[in-house]
Image: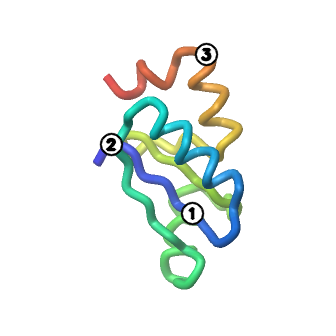
Amino acid sequence: MDIIIYTGPMCPYCDKAKALLQSKELEYKEIYVGDDPDLMMEMIDKANGRRSVPQIFIKNNHVGGFDDLYAIDKSGELDKLLI
């Protein structure tokens, strides 16, 4: 899976990130960290210490959160990352 999104409970930015990916008909793997401290630590380690959700990875590259995903989509870079 080229896109991985770590999500948490009651997270509107997680929903927005998933909706953006779905609007582009992109498949992604969602990893819910709300109930699992080990998955939360995995996300924090992979995201260079960032604790907020969502944290999004494309082809093992850390994109960031929803605002970062939105910005790279608007700049046209998202499509380039997926090639």
**Mark 1 element type:** strand
Q: CA distance from mark 3 to mark 2?
A: 20 Å
Q: CA distance from mark 3 to mark 1?
A: 24 Å
Residue 7 - label:
1
Look at the numbered discs 1 and 2 and tell me whether their residues touch, using CB distance below 8 Å.
Answer: no
Percent x, y for residue 62?
A: 52, 44
Percent x, y for residue 46?
A: 51, 59
- Tell me which label, 3 or 1, sits earlier in the chain: 1
Left or right? Give the position of 29 relative to 38. Answer: left
Under mark 1, the amino acid is Thr
Under mark 3, the amino acid is Ser
Q: Residue at x 60, y 35 (%)?
A: 69
Q: Give the vertical position of 23 relative to 80 (above or below).
A: below
Please identify the quarter of the rendering in which residue 41 is found.
Answer: bottom right
Under mark 2, the amino acid is Asp
Please identify, in this view, whether the residue under mark 1 or under mark 2 is nearer the observer: 1
Q: Residue at x 58, y 53 (%)?
A: 55
Which residue, given by chain and number where applicable, does mark 3 sit on? 75
Numbered disc total:
3
Which residue, given by chain and number where applicable, does mark 2 sit on? 2
Q: Residue at x 66, y 27 (%)?
A: 71
**Mark 2 element type:** loop
Look at the numbered discs 3 and 2 and tell me whether their residues touch, using CB distance below 8 Å.
Answer: no
